[in-house]
Image (spheres, coloured by chain):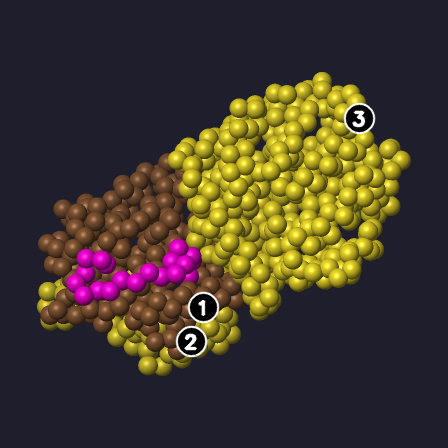
Amino acid sequence: MSSTFVGMPAFPEAARNAVADPTLRGNLRHATHTIRAKRAGAVAELSDWAELREAGRRIKDHTLRHLDRYLEQLEASVTAAGGTVHWAADADEANRIVTRLVKETGESEVVKVKSMATQEIGLNEALEAEGIRAYETDLAELIVQLGKDRPSHILVPAIHRNRGEIRDIFAHEMAAWGRPAPANLTDTPADLAEAARLHLREKFLRARVGVSGANFMVAETGTLVVVESEGNGRMCLTLPRTLISVVGIEKIVPTWRDLEVFLQTLPRSSTAERMNPYTSTWTGTTDEDGPRTFHLVLLDNGRTDALADQVGRQALRCIRCSACLNVCPVYERAGGHAYGSVYPGPIGAVLTPQLRGTTSEIDASLPYASSLCGACYEVCPVAIDIPEVLVHLRERVVQGGPAVRQGNKVVLRPAKGHAAERAAMRAAAWAFGHPGALRAGQRLASRSRRLHPRTLPGPGRAWSGTRDLPTPPAEPFRDWWQRTRGGKDAK
Amino acid sequence: MRVALFLTCVNDTLYPETGKAVVKLLGRLGVEVDFPMGQTCCGQAHYNTGYRHEAEPLARRFAEVFGEYDAVVTPSGSCGAMVRQAYPRMGERAGAEGRGDSLARALAPVVPKTYELTEFLVDVLGVTDVGARYPHRVTYHPTCHGLRGLGLGDRPRRLLEAVEGLDLVELPGADECCGFGGTFAVKNAAVSAAMGRDKVRNAESTGAEVLCAADNSCLMHIGGTMSRLRVGMRPVHIARILASTEEDPAV
């Protein structure tokens, strides 16, 4: 994934810093609570939401089960429609392919439609290294790019910024990238949108190469689909002569009939709209209309490894709606950057450790970035049981075990730094297997209760730094039960 | 009907009053509960932290200890969800690891007959008015594994609304997690504490004297935060409120 995330601290440390930032907390709280309430309203309008959710789950599971077949069908359909299909096993290969394709056009700049796949592979940085400038045209991606920042949300990458911050970024940075912001720019939404519109317009009209991702690929016709709100995507998909789309292999749906389900669930889940303003579809190339050349780069980058995992593979159903981020109490307080990946929030915590593995400190800490409250699973429009996958990945971190990495079956070793916890868990399991030992421990706690401090030293401070400890009772329940014969004797 | 109380290791050790309240409440409703002494822990902390294999013998013990009863009642939404949701999964995973169906078969019988307390009262005994009296202003926090895991719905609320003298006030942001999350509370202490503070501030805004929930581990976190922030409220398990009567009142 993007090199900008290399060297991130583990989640707890990054989250601790975010929690201590009142501006960030305020921005995130306001934004997530607003969209959370709107989504709930948009979903409640549909009487058949549960059926749509189940249909989405089944379509994705079916497609993933037969992914090999549908990928070949898609390749044949795209090729028949005049497109060229490229296969990229990992980020490096995808970046090399896109860089070569851009160079072959003789151009040194591209306009981009908002795309998670190209963020995932760090395409902009790879192009920059080869002297090709990539311009983000989605408003929020533009804010992130101009601010030399990282995205912190899947749908709203600049969610961590407020209007005042955005005004300052536009006023100071736009000139270095093209048309400067108007003088006396205010922080009203209309002014900010107008500044972005003027800045981007010249890029749309000049660009000869567009780069996009896709929300869906329809195997039966080879059609790609982008859903968006701003219209910048439509510009990038239609004006340039060459269009290059980088899409994860899990984005396939077999037929247009299947697509219908997701065109209902995606906008309501992500932006709380009944229908998104722009839905662009294209099938190969069409003479004298739109791009003359179309390349589709199919990206694996860890997806078939995830597909091999019986529990983890459900994360590949994700349609990147962000509903799980918006309801997550941990995301709301930690912010997106703490997850060290372009995929933050609950879905990021299950996707990133599968795509990148669990060897780095940040990746091994992600499965624990959750209280397992289950709010994410409840809103997921394709019913990904995120808590189940989190627990499964925790097991992979602490116990290791069989997995598939880069297509090869491997046996992972337990991650470092869990030795004390493992010993404690084993000791607890032993005590719980011996009620006598448990009882001895309970009695010791009860009889020494006057000696217990209100705060703990060392690692115990993680609890007692902010919370008082309960005082153990005079006797544990089981002693009371025996002494009073279940309460029949005197209390 | 032979009914067993699965108190949970946390309640047994730290909150015996909750266990006594369940015994008293169910006794008043004509159900004599047994407390099998072989019970210890359902294995939730192990399972949820990634130690599924260490949780397996605890699950087997649970199934052995409670196998002979017609119903198992537990005053904990999260331990109830552990048995009902995670035990079947543990059986499946053992099978997928090539260890046969012995674990699945051992655990299967206890899964459908394990009930969280408010489920047992409303669904099995068919009561919502349990004859309790608790003249206090109370706000209710639905804990996550009860709310979303077991789908307790409005059962706790219906029980509380029927309590004589109880003034139930709405908790803002009730459905949001309090931030306990088992080992999450110490592994991600900063986020956990921030969630706890927000929960306590929301509770404080209701003007209630008591924050009620059906899970003492969440209440330990919320109560510990209240005490540290010197908020004049107290955490009380729903079993103690439902057991409270004029003659034998809980505070």
Query: In the rendered image of this protein, which colour is used for chain B?
Result: brown
Q: Does residue A280 appear left or right of residue A475 in this picture?
A: right
Q: Quadrant of residue B16?
A: bottom left
Q: Which residues are magenta?
A: B160-178
Residue that label 1 marks: B197
Q: CA distance from mark 3 to mark 1?
A: 58 Å
Residue that label 3 marks: A292
Q: Are marks 3 and 1 in contact (CB under 8 Å)?
A: no
Q: Which element is circle 1 on?
A: helix
Mark 2 belongs to chain: B
Classify mark 2: residues with Cα within 10 Å, few (<14), some (14-19) or many (20+): some
Q: Are marks 1 and 2 in contact (CB under 8 Å)?
A: yes
Whether callout 1 and callout 2 share a subunit is answered yes
Q: CA distance from mark 3 to mark 2?
A: 66 Å
Precedes in sequence: disc 1 or disc 2: 1
Look at discs 3 and 1 and give the one toward the viewer. 3
Residue that label 2 marks: B229
Mark 3 belongs to chain: A
Q: Does residue A368 appear left or right of residue A148 in this picture?
A: left
